Amino acid sequence: MGFFVRRLSFYFIALLFAITINFIIPRAMPGDPVTMMFANAAVQVTPERIAAMKELLGFVDGPMYQQYFIYVKGILSWDLGISIQTYPQTVNEMLGNAVGWSLFLAGTAVILAFCLGSTLGIFAAWKRGSKYDAFISPGMLVVQAVPPVVVAMLVLYTFAIGTKWFPSTYAYTPGRTPDWTSWDFYLDVGYHAVLPLFCATIIQIGGFLINMRNNMINLLNEDYITMAKGKGLSENRIVFKYAARNAMLPSVTALSMAIGMAIGGQLIIEMIFNYPGLGTVLLNAINQRDYQVLQGQLLIMTMFMLFFNFMADILIVALDPRLRKGGK
């Protein structure tokens, strides 16, 4: 319980710090989004109407600390304000429509990368020094080192623009009404998700592969592995039941952290494929200087990352009894 309270306090302070930075950054940017909105409309607007719109959107005049407390009060009531670019739609509605697509893409990509990377890492450790290990380990590291924007552009050009095997944009066929009770709609969503999902998965496999490989190599030198070999146990049993089972612990905690980080890391992929997730919303908000949406999105991304990091801390203590005994 002491460990739980200490970690919870740490993440609460981290969240408060992130909220403060989130409040300061948009207000430090040049330009007035409300004035720009009326300027783009090319109509004559009275100063009174501009002042009323600023108050409605939360850009009130007054001391910075007063604005800060109003901002924090809105967060506590989960009122993130009204979007400037899609007025009168609220930020909650905009992000609520986008966050599901980002979670689907990030969660699926991390799970696929974890399964593939861990499996490849197990065999790379068991056959270390072989041609397989010499090819797969550095090969995945090279792929991981390539910027996501380069991977996404190559995949888009090759499989969408060049061969036209897959669609190049959006999460389902444009103009189609979403029907979550129809299998055809799910197939359409899966078909459109192939390329962005491939990009989000391939850039993460190397990390899980190297992590599992290193853990396995350390465990393969343990006495109980030597004894299992001496007893004549099958190779598959030694690899999966004895070595991989114990080597999986650090990888499971890395999985929890990777889900939170993947949501932020895949934004560029969503932008390139015009996927209706947080990445596309972020790009549009930056172009329109929609501070309300920017603040709301950065807040949600921070909360996701802190939550999954907290879950990783709790998970490693729950899975490893040595840490529980050490904390007493």
Image (tube, grey):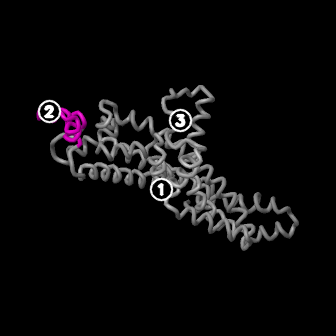
Against 99, is 312 above or below? below
* Label 1 CA crowd tier, 10 Å (few <14, some 14–19, many 20+): some
**Residue 1: image location, x then y, percent:** 51, 51
Q: Residue furthest right?
A: 232
The amino acid type of the residue labelled 2 equals: Val
Is residue 46 a member of the stretch shown in magenta? yes
- Residue 172: mark: 3
**Residue 204: image location, x then y, percent:** 57, 57
Determine if residue 261 is in view. yes
- Give the main secondary structure, helix, strand or loop, of the magenta stretch: helix
Closest to the observer: 173 or 301? 173
Local secondary structure at mark 2: loop
Against 35, is 29 above or below? below
Q: Residue at x 33, y 35 (%)?
A: 79
Is residue 43 a member of the stretch shown in magenta? yes
Q: The magenta stretch spans which residues?
A: 33-57
**Residue 49: image location, x then y, percent:** 15, 31
Mark 2 and mark 3 in contact? Answer it, CB < 8 Å: no
Q: Residue at x 85, y 62 (%)?
A: 234
> Which residue is denoted by mark 2 in the rendering?
45
Quadrant in which the C terminus appears: bottom right
Determine if residue 314 is in view. no
| Label 3 – label 1 distance at C-alpha | 22 Å
* Label 2 CA crowd tier, 10 Å (few <14, some 14–19, many 20+): few
Closest to the observer: 267 or 2? 267
> Which residue is denoted by mark 1 in the rendering?
149
| Label 1 – label 2 distance at C-alpha | 41 Å
The first of marks 1 and 2 along the sequence is: 2
* In this rendering, position of residue 302 left or right of residue 252: left
Against 104, is 124 above or below? below
